[in-house]
Image: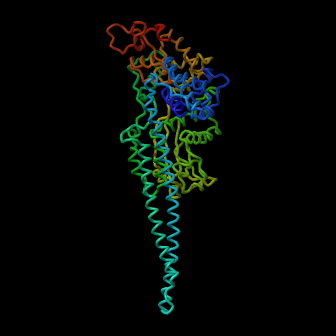
Amino acid sequence: MDALVLLLLDVRKQAGLSVEDLHELLRSGGQLGDQLPARSTLYRKLSGAGLMNERRLVEAVIGACVPNEQQAVTLRERAVGLLHQAWSKDAEPVPPRLEAPAINDDAMAELIKVQSALITVQIQLATALQAAAEAEKEAARSRALVSMLLALGAVKASAMREDPASGAAPELQSRLADAVAEREEAQQVLRATQRRLAEAEGLLAARTMGPAGSDHPGRREWPTIRRNSANWSAAVAGRGQGADPSELDTSASPIRPYTEQGGVSLSERQFHTPEHDAGLADVLAEMLRLDPDGSRIGAVIDGAGRHLLDPVHTGRYLWSQLTKVEKTGLATSVGHRIQRELGLADGLQLDFSVAGHEVDMRFTRGDNWMFPPELQGGLCLLVRADDASGQWSLGLLRVRPELMRTGSNRDGKRGLSAQGRSAIHWIHRDIPLPEHALRRLPADVVDAIFAQPSGQARIEELFLQAQLTAITTADLSAVTMQLDGVKRARDARRRLAARGVLVLNGTRSQDREWASALDLPSLVSGTWMSIRLAPAPQHDDSPTVTLDGTPWRVARPGDAETPLPPTAHS
């Protein structure tokens, strides 16, 4: 069953879909009808719980994530074979079949092998930790006993000096010798356990981090489109009239690694960790291991915001549009989703247990956090996120009184002083949130879009007004305020072709090739983009794409609207 879970996870990652996006696609597509599980149930099933009897769900997930029908058929056959293996322990393994390059059986088998080894090492580490704790307790008892007997021996020696005839107590000397031997034995056990613990930690680090310079197996780039801010307003203002491509910054680049954003590397961050705070160092290392590039937590924060905005039913797309109660619930939702995404255990007193340490989480959309008195001395994960700036950060702090402001509110909560903010150990800092077009478009453009009378008309206005802009499924849901936003976008592709506007879908390989040929921003799976085209004249050296044997280029302001050939919207 683990192999099937990994197969579905890889397919979903290749499509660039979160579980929330997948659930929305399944609901809008109607593949499962009234048998579509709830979103929380879908999370559990995709993790393997009860997946054995969900053949229809497995096939629907593959169909939603893989647009290529031939590839989807191959993956469905493989998934069904894995289900049969899970149903019968004696079933023969499914013979290898040709499939998409992204699904590699050897790599999957190696991943399962490494995960099994990792679980074994973690068990060894836990056993070593327990043995070390027992040895430390035994050594402490031995030291206390030796100290007591030495004190008694000193009293007895003093008495002997006053009365030499009394002699030394043989029983006391025997107990003292036994206690000394017991202490030495306990110290030897403690040293041996510490060596085992160090070896287990080394093995765990080798299994989780991999060889030096290798990419983390869960690492993936978060796609975004970056524009020159000076050109942004002029570019958007000219889109309705077919802006000159030369005036648009169409460069696209993925999120840069942490080190390119002014941060430090993993090894450097470990090096700068205070040596006297082992708990803080453990939590830092574990959080970096679980999400080395921040892509998982970034998706969680964005998903929590989209869930509360509920664009399908409300048309909202900005966190500022949330009610006061919903804004309070955003912090709670982010905490629950981080715990579920990273698989963190519940804490006994605080929110989570990370690497065996109790950790609380504080969330803010501003620039400070508030800490109640009972958190003093504890560890806190600090999350800062704001869709207005489009960035989020994650840090770790050991809460201490000297790092707090002097004043407090009525509940006794205090914020961080300047010294406290400088004491934060940043795990990820100023990482871009997933881009959503409606958050970045000027207010008058958004007003023009929502002024249209129907969901279909609003979708078409969005593609006309926001050309060369990545449109997400969340944007489609907010604009249509309907469950079938993706279907509306497909209809808009056909209708806008009559006006010379090419609507591209990142899920289609042909569309991605067209975007590359026209030198447009890179098109990510699960996103949409539009651009007006015109026939390319002879001897024009602009980037072109061939449609029905005719070269087309990005339209310029003086180009007339020319309907696209059927190939463009098939």
Q: Is residue 308 visible?
A: no
The quarter holding residue 40 reads top right
Does residue 167 appear to the left or right of 372 in the view shown? Answer: left
Judging depth in this view, the residue of 260 and 240 nearest the camera is 260
The N terminus lies in quadrant: top right
Judged from this view, the residue extending furthest toward the right is 34
Residue 544 percent location from the top left of the image: 38, 13
Residue 401 percent location from the top left of the image: 53, 58
Judged from this view, the residue extending furthest toward the front is 90
Judging depth in this view, the residue of 364 and 450 nearest the camera is 364
Q: Is residue 185 above or below residue 110?
A: below
Q: Is residue 349 visible?
A: yes
Q: Residue at x 58, y 16 (%)?
A: 457
Does residue 318 appear to the left or right of 555 in the view shown? Answer: right
Judging depth in this view, the residue of 250 and 381 nearest the camera is 381
- How are the residues colored? rainbow
Residue 93 percent location from the top left of the image: 51, 28
Q: How many marks?
A: 0
Does residue 480 appear to the left or right of 397 in the view shown? Answer: right
Q: Is residue 433 above or below residue 250?
A: below
Q: Residue at x 51, y 70 (%)?
A: 142
Residue 558 percent location from the top left of the image: 42, 11
Judging depth in this view, the residue of 230 and 459 nearest the camera is 459
